[in-house]
Amino acid sequence: MKSEMMKKLEQVAFGRTKPFCYGCYRQAPTGVCLSCGSDDLMRELPGVGVEYGLNWVIEHILREELTPVDLDTEFESSMEGCYADETQIGFIKVNTLWAIQKLDPTAWDMAKQEWIDSEEQEDRILSFDNGSTYYKVEDLESLE
């Protein structure tokens, strides 16, 4: 799934950019600079910049057009459906999720990581930076 999505992002990035000759500082829409004949071209993303390759364009698209998944909020929302709103500890009633987080933060973190792994395996979320930032696959698929 990740390689398929990366291909789609590359296609989107390629479609949004134009070949650009940095030496002559002009677009080269034919793939060869009409001024100097060079085919060693950069890609220009109008209004953003010029650089070799497409990775910088993909990073720009991800940063500017998509909202990263808030893993904490999404995980808590997922857990809310699994547990009662309140738990009684002795004579005190507390929010169940709060109690789990505060009484056993290690178990909470492990459960959150298992949830992230599951979401990724089921192709609901995807990361392009080794898990620092995740995006919803449906948001990625909607890019054009």
Image (cartoon, rainbow, N blue to C red):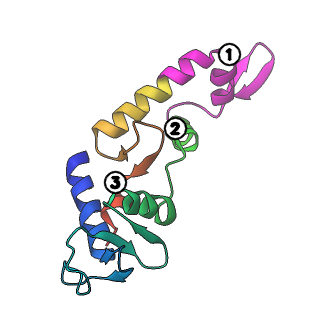
Q: Amino acid at mark 2?
A: Phe
Q: Which residue is mark 3?
A: 137
Residue 143: image quadrant is bottom left
Query: What residue is disc 2 on?
Result: 75
Q: Residue shown at 50%/32% (left/top)?
A: 82
Residue designated by label 1: 103
Image: magenta residue range: 81-110
> Which badge, 3 or 1, is on the more N-terminal residue?
1
- 29 in the magenta segment: no
Instruction: Return the x and y of residue 62 as percentages of the image width and height.
Output: 44, 59
| Circle 2 crowding by C-alpha within 10 Å: few under 14, some 14–19, many from 20 | some
Amino acid under label 1?
Leu
Q: Are marks 1 and 2 in contact (CB under 8 Å)?
A: no
Residue 51 x/y as whole percent: 38, 64
| Magenta-drawn stretch contains 104 | yes
Q: Nearer the viewer, mark 3 or mark 2?
A: 3
